[in-house]
Amino acid sequence: MLKILGEHYYFDLDKIEEYINVDTPLDEFSGETAPQNTISVVRYDMVKLLTETILTEDAETDETLGLKSSNGLSMPFKLAFNSLLNKKLINKY
């Protein structure tokens, strides 16, 4: 397993699926939900773009410095990483 910023991180695929799924009511009066999967297109696209940003970062960092080495990372990477970490879509292993 590779270290990222001095820690082991992973994409929580179950959380991502839960985050982009939207429950659609069958009947607005009964409150029952539809069994089929419906996703939020906005959330799906944002998670996709944030994930692509993280996976395509090519900055060379010294992993022994941990978070101190994050100065060489791009602004899009930092925003994407922090956004996904905040929503708990990326977790420490």
Image (cartoon, rainbow, N blue to C red):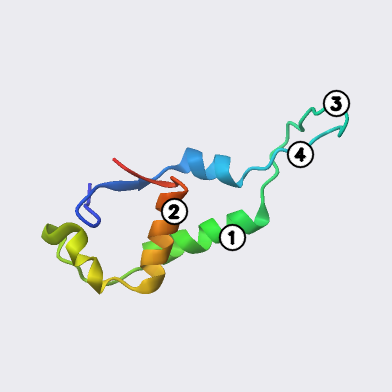
Q: Dot 4: within a 10 Å radius of its alpha carbon, few (fewer than 14), some, or many (20 or more) residues?
A: some
**Earlier sequence position, callout 2 versus callout 4:** 4
**Earlier sequence position, callout 3 versus callout 4:** 4
The amino acid type found where label 2 is placed reads Leu
Question: Which numbered tag is attached to residue 84?
Answer: 2
Is 63 or 83 nearer to us in this picture?
Answer: 83
Q: Which residue is mark 1?
A: 45
**Earlier sequence position, callout 3 versus callout 1:** 3
* Residue 32 pos. (x, y %): 79, 27
The amino acid type found where label 1 is placed reads Asp
The amino acid type found where label 3 is placed reads Ser
- For the C terminus, the image quarter is top left
How far apart are the alpha carbons under marks 2 and 3? 35 Å
Q: Which residue is mark 3?
A: 30
C-beta proximity under 8 Å, tags 2 and 4: no
**Earlier sequence position, callout 1 versus callout 2:** 1
* Residue 85 pos. (x, y %): 40, 51
C-beta proximity under 8 Å, tags 1 and 2: no
**Earlier sequence position, callout 2 versus callout 3:** 3
- Quarter assignment of residue 63: bottom left
- Which residue is found at the position 22% from the left and 46% from the top? 1
C-beta proximity under 8 Å, tags 2 and 3: no
Secondary-structure class at tag 2: helix
